[in-house]
Image (cartoon, rainbow, N blue to C red):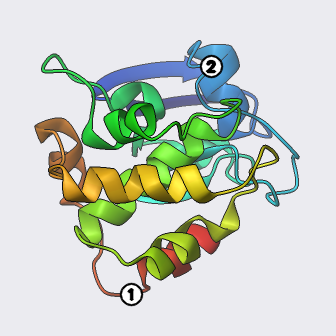
Amino acid sequence: MQITTTVNGRECTQDVEPRLLLVHFLRDHLGLTGTHWGCDTSNCGACVVWLDAMPVKACTVLAVMADGCDVRTVEGLETESGLDPIQQGFVECHGLQCGFCTPAMLMTGRWLLNHDPDPSEETIREAISGQVCRCTGYENIVRSIRWAAEHGSGAPAAVAEADESAVPGQRSAAEEVRA
């Protein structure tokens, strides 16, 4: 089956098996290995990407469901002007840890800041609660997201533009990420 998607601002058309998961499409067909495949049951949240500006777990979405949609991965956060503030926050506050969950945490954190530029620690913890970090815990991740909020969480133009198509107000940021 042929699908056409826009991934990180670039349109691509590919032939895919109807049962192919979005996470495998991104990694194996497009070479975007920043999206990690962890548990295959949607419990770990390591595969979070944006589908039409909404965070989704890419192991629960078929690639054919992304046909005609805008997909944003961690590779789409950095722009020509540099790192997204959320990425810089993870550098500054050592939120990277082992790095396996980092891309999904970055996508969740960026999405949260787009909807709540000054989230409380409780809101941040709720937003990332659908993702498992198996390192030392969430302290540095929470600090990293707070750092981005305190140091200009404004989204780079490409991210902000994509986010404008989101349907606001249907669920809270934390509810969307946990779904």
Q: Residue at x 27, y 26 (%)?
A: 83
Whether residue 58 is situated above or below residue 177 in the rendered picture: above
Q: Residue at x 69, y 58 (%)?
A: 131
Q: Residue at x 33, y 24 (%)?
A: 11
Residue under label 1, please give it: 170
Q: Quadrant of the N terminus?
A: top right
Answer left or right for 119 relative to 154: right
Q: Which is more N-terminal, label 2 or label 1?
A: 2
**Numbered disc 2: secondary structure:** loop
Q: Position of residue 91 (x, y in %)?
A: 42, 31
Residue under label 2, please give it: 33
Q: Position of residue 107 (x, y in %)?
A: 46, 47
**Numbered disc 1: secondary structure:** loop
Whether residue 166 is situated above or below residue 50 in the rendered picture: below
Q: Residue at x 27, y 35 (%)?
A: 84
Three-letter amino acid code at disc 2?
Thr
Answer left or right for 154 relative to 128: left
